[in-house]
Image: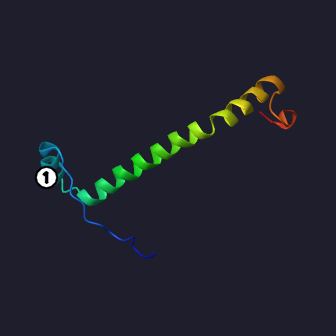
Amino acid sequence: MSQPARESVKLRLDGELLSLACGLKIDLTLAAEDGIKQAVKAERERLWRIENADAIAACNEYIEKNGLPLAKYRLF
């Protein structure tokens, strides 16, 4: 699998945090990418929940009124 294209960026970081990370030999690029990936994932999930709130509410309402479909076949 090929590596994604990399772009250089300029970041301002807390100096103490940067010193600690360097002292622990943390790869700053990978750490930044991991943090950004987590932030992107969290924001996409938040937006998905907002976009689908009506459908989720309707589904929950149906289950409250009618129970789970095929519930009689559940073994637990």
Seen in the image, is 38 located left or right of residue 25? right
Residue at the bottom extreme, as displayed: 2
Tell me where residue 47 appears, x and y as whole percent. Answer: 52, 41
Seen in the image, is 48 located left or right of residue 72? left
Seen in the image, is 35 located left or right of residue 50? left
Dot 1: element: helix
Q: How is the image coloured?
A: rainbow
User: Is 72 located above or below residue 25 in the figure?
Assistant: above
User: Is 57 located above or below residue 23 in the figure?
Assistant: above
Q: Amino acid at mark 1?
A: Gly
Tell me where residue 16 appears, x and y as whole percent. Answer: 12, 43
User: Is 51 located above or below residue 30 in the figure?
Assistant: above
Residue indicated by mark 1:
23
Residue drawn where x is 36% and y is 51% of the image:
36
Residue drawn where x is 12% and y is 45% of the image:
15
Seen in the image, is 10 located left or right of residue 31? left
State the image quarter where residue 62 is shown.
top right
Tell me where residue 52 appears, x and y as whole percent. Answer: 63, 39
Within 10 Å of the Cα at label 1, are there few (<14), some (14-19), or many (20+) other Cα atoms?
few
Could you tell me how many numbered marks the image carries? Answer: 1
Q: Quadrant of the C terminus?
A: top right
Residue drawn where x is 57% and y is 43% of the image:
48
Camera-nearest residue between 60 and 73: 60
Residue at the top extreme, as displayed: 65
Camera-nearest residue between 30 and 10: 10
Residue drawn where x is 57% and y is 37% of the image:
50
